Image (spheres, rainbow, N blue to C red):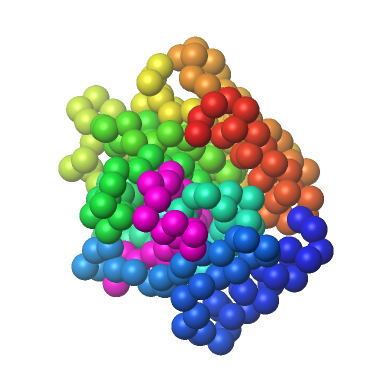
Amino acid sequence: MNKSLSIIIFCVSLCFLWTGCKEKKVTLGKDISFQKEENIHYGNDPEQVMDLYIPYQEPSKKRDIFIIIHGGGWRGGDKSQLTFFTLSMMQRFPDHTFANINYRLATSTRPGIPNQTDDIQNVVNYLDKKLRYNPRFILLGNSAGGHLSMLYAYHSDAQKRVKAVVNIVGPSDLSDPGFEKYMDYSFVKNYLVDPKAIVSGRSKTSFASPVSWVDSASAPTLSYYGNRDQIIPLSQKRKLDSVFTQNKVNHESYEFNGGHLDWDKSPNDQLLIDKIDYFLNSRGKK
């Protein structure tokens, strides 16, 4: 990321996070501006909120939408963690709309699945009504958000509205022995999935694993994994790539130097944005 853009984004981020400014326009360099709405309620639960950014020029134009989905182990995290990265993406993709969302966090008494994939659908429904057209969506999430992006796209997107998925260090197979070393795996195994939602014959972990639902019609997917990640092992990348190859799904996967939290640090962040740009453009996905 160049120095001037970093300064611009840093200043805007300070405004968002620390001063609580109410400015309705975000400017990210020459001729790149967005209308901003913060903490829009797309449901009745206090956690069902999102920040929406619509290109300032021709706000009524029908555009594809990035839905940005934070991580946090399904029961933590907040959309503010991805504000800086969202601004970076907006600078690279100024002709897209962006929705940076929160979702209902899981607890031992409130399962994450299917509530959290339902919340992605709730966001889709809300945006359809608000924007008054039927856009296509690019789901981008990190860690648990990457998992939810994939699970929604491969299992819940009945109308095939998702044109692409960007999975950043997200688990694709919850039954992978390598992932069982995750320190909070007992919560994943016992509480993440509502037993009432499970299809007959499947375990909780199988039901909630994106690899279980991949077929030839699955959305094109770009994946990004750390070569020193102690939470999401590279076996997750290999399993996902193998299933995609078997089903002839358009996909790319890359490794970056670092651990689970290093994907948005320089130079990994710029490499990721470059790969997303290439994936969406050169493969004719726009």
Asked whether residue 286 is in view, the answer is yes
Residue 262 horizontal/vertical position (percent): 70, 53
Residue 112, position as x, y percentages in the image = 33, 52
Q: Point out the image quarter for the N terminus.
A: bottom right
Magenta stretch bounds? 46-72
Residue at the far bottom in the pictured view: 19
127 in the magenta segment: no
Residue in front for this viewpoint, 153 or 231: 153
Query: Outermost residue toward the front?
Result: 58
Residue 163, percent from left and from top: 43, 34
Q: Decide which of 119, 282 is in the foreground and name it.
A: 282
Q: Residue 68 lies in magenta, yes or no?
A: yes
For the image, the number of numbered tags is: 0
Q: Residue at x 56, y 78 (%)?
A: 17
Please, is residue 207 above or below residue 116 in the view?
above
Residue at left offset 71%, top offset 36%: 255
> Toward the viewer: 264 or 207?
264
Does residue 220 lie above or below 120 as drawn?
above
From this view, report whether residue 204 is shown above or below residue 86.
above
- Which residue is drawn at the image coordinates 53% and 40% (left, top)? 166
Please name the residue shown 73% across and 43% down the image.
Answer: 271
- Residue 203, by quadrant, is top left
Could you say which is closer to the camera, residue 35 or residue 39?
Answer: 35
Examine the rendering and report whether any part of residue 76 can be seen. Answer: no
